[in-house]
Amino acid sequence: MRTHTPTPSTAEPRSRAHLIGDDMARWFAAQGWAAAPRVGSVPRAFVDELRLSKVTIRRVWHTPLVLTRTVDAPQPTRHVWLQTQGAARIDDSTGSVHQLRTQSAIAWADPAVSRLTASQPTARIEIESRGFTGLRIQADTYTHLDGRTGGPLTAWSCLAGTVNMLLNADTPLDDRSARLFALALDAMTDAVTPPAVGAGPRPRRNDLVQEARRLLSEHASDPSYTVQRAAEELGVTRSHLTRAFGREGDSPRQFLRTQRVSRARHLLAIDPDTDLSTVAHQSGIPSARALRESLRANAREDARSGDP
């Protein structure tokens, strides 16, 4: 495998792009990936990136595609991916498969990962820390944890929140702040990445609510996907599924709505000028009007809870 030398940083390290077709393929090629979109679909990606000393952070959203690793980083680099929407399959160089789902993370170093396959629109946060040694691919050991769970998910949320804060900032960082944030981000990734493959037992994955959340999250971008359909795929009635969620203080309908609004907010954070009809379509929301109503309702809920 060849070694990839990235394009030198410019004076302004921040970049945001809406990429379509060949432009998307060229961007992924510059990162060391060959992109093969789903036949019949329009390949599209939104990328929001910031370089901080030896750490690069980015938000990436793209349509269904297969990414095949073609070149390695020129120096030891730790890649940490936090899945924020949708799902993807990761094939590593040993032939093992890792499922990257919403609120899961995977860490790896070249040449560990060989392919990413996304059969649906998907979004993730990527953190690249250059100049580190002795890195191994990490197991996806805490998939589908909910927002009331502590431990690794709390670290996941803190790291994702820090990256989003830096990418949303209007004022550039000075050199000293950039170096300090780079050190902090690299340290925070240690709290997110689970033990190496084979280091311990994986959690049970047969919990009804967890499986329902997985289905609802993976299909949230499809406006025709309903709670009823998820219940049928799980072999239970809708009322049974609703009661199961209720025991955890939640509802499947609200969870699905939250996933869709979260996708829409993510896309708007990357490119606030994106047409609302396009954002609604890509988020599983039936119309631009419904999207505006959902965003207003979400803003009212944030105001009541005190969230920014």
Image: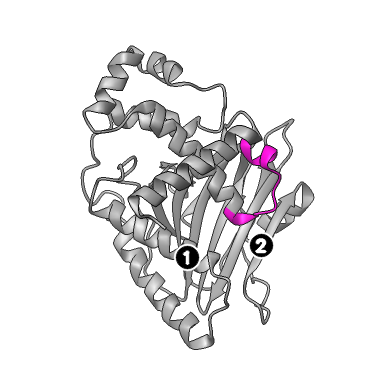
Q: Are marks 2 and 1 in contact (CB under 8 Å)?
A: no
Q: Is residue 262 magenta?
A: no
Quadrant for the N terminus in the image: bottom right
At label 2, which amino acid type do we have? Arg
Q: Position of residue 86 (x, y in %)?
A: 49, 39
Q: Position of residue 243 (x, y in %)?
A: 26, 21
At label 1, which amino acid type do we have? Met
**Secondary element at image label 1:** helix
Q: CA distance from mark 2 to mark 1?
A: 15 Å
Which disc number belongs to residue 281? none
284 lies above or below 178:
above
Residue at point 77%, 46% (across, down) = 21
Left or right of 217 on screen, residue 70 = right
Disc 2: which residue: 16
Left or right of 299 on screen, residue 287 = right
Left or right of 112 on screen, residue 140 = left
Disc 1: which residue: 165
Residue 48 appears in view: yes
Q: Quadrant of residue 278?
A: top right
**Considering only order in the chain, which callout, 1 or 2, is on the residue closer to the N terminus?**
2
Magenta span: 269-280
Residue 116 appears in view: no
Q: Position of residue 260 (x, y in %)?
A: 51, 37
